[in-house]
């Protein structure tokens, strides 16, 4: 389970990779890179369905401090495996992307892992529907402590 401290630590890093399935996928990570860039993050996007520099975390030109995995659950362990190979110490499995295998792979490799949370609910400033969602979770006592 994620804690507020884990979320703050992850979001305190400004060089982040975002793993998506493909350039054309309209779900699972669509728009996260644009929104985080507006918030001051340097986001490198990796597309699992592409070969070469755009298809592997280990091939990024610049090192990153964390990775957001926003793919279908059956692909999340593949993305986490790349994070392990690249020596990335922080993984955020975007809400809806997590799988038991991916979480276990993170645990087995001592990777700080956030799952079951939407990064857009925490990356400040939080706007639009994400602000409403966060407010509802706060009222219901569901925000990480």
Image (cartoon, grey):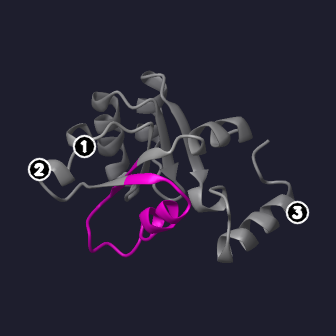
Q: Residue at x 33, y 36 (%)?
A: 63
Q: Of callouts 1 and 2, which one flags the residue occurring earlier in the amino acid sequence?
A: 2
Nearer to us: label 3 or label 2: 2
Q: CA distance from mark 3 to mark 1?
A: 40 Å
* Label 3 residue SS: helix
For the C terminus, which image quadrant? Answer: top right
Nearer to us: label 1 or label 2: 1
Q: Residue at x 22, y 45 (%)?
A: 56
Image quadrant where residue 25 sits: bottom left
Disc 3 + disc 2, Cβ < 8 Å: no
* Label 1 residue SS: loop
Is 92 a magenta residue? no
Identify which residue, 5 or 81, lies in the foreground: 5
* Label 2 residue SS: helix
Q: Is residue 37 among the parts visible in the rendering?
A: yes
**Residue 92, percent from left and from top:** 50, 45
Q: Residue at x 78, y 61 (%)?
A: 137
Q: CA distance from mark 3 to mark 2?
A: 45 Å
Is 38 a magenta residue? yes
Residue interval drawn in magenta? 17-43
**Residue 144, percent from left and from top:** 75, 46
Label number found at residue 52:
2
**Residue 103, percent from left and from top:** 48, 37
Q: CA distance from mark 1 to mark 2?
A: 10 Å
Label number found at residue 60:
1
Disc 3 + disc 1, Cβ < 8 Å: no
118 vs 9: above or below:
below
Q: For the residue carrying disc 2, how many other residues have a C-alpha within 10 Å: few (<14), some (14-19), or many (20+)?
A: few
Identify which residue, 97 or 70, lies in the foreground: 70
Task: Identify the residue under disc 3.
Answer: 139
């Amino acid at each position: 389970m994620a804690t507020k401290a884990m979320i703050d630590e992850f979001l305190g890093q400004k060089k982040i990779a975002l793993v998506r399935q493909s350039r054309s996928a309209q779900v699972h990570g669509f728009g996260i890179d644009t929104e985080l860039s507006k918030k001051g993050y340097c986001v490198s996007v990796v597309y699992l369905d592409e070969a070469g520099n755009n298809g592997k975390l280990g091939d990024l030109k610049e090192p990153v401090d964390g990775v957001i995995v926003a793919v279908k659950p059956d692909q999340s362990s593949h993305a986490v495996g790349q994070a392990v190979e690249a020596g990335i110490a922080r993984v955020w499995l975007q809400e809806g992307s997590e799988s038991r295998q991916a979480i276990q792979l993170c645990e087995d490799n001592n990777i700080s892992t956030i799952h079951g949370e939407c990064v857009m609910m925490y990356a400040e400033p939080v706007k639009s529907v994400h602000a409403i969602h966060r407010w509802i979770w706060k009222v219901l006592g569901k925000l990480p402590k």
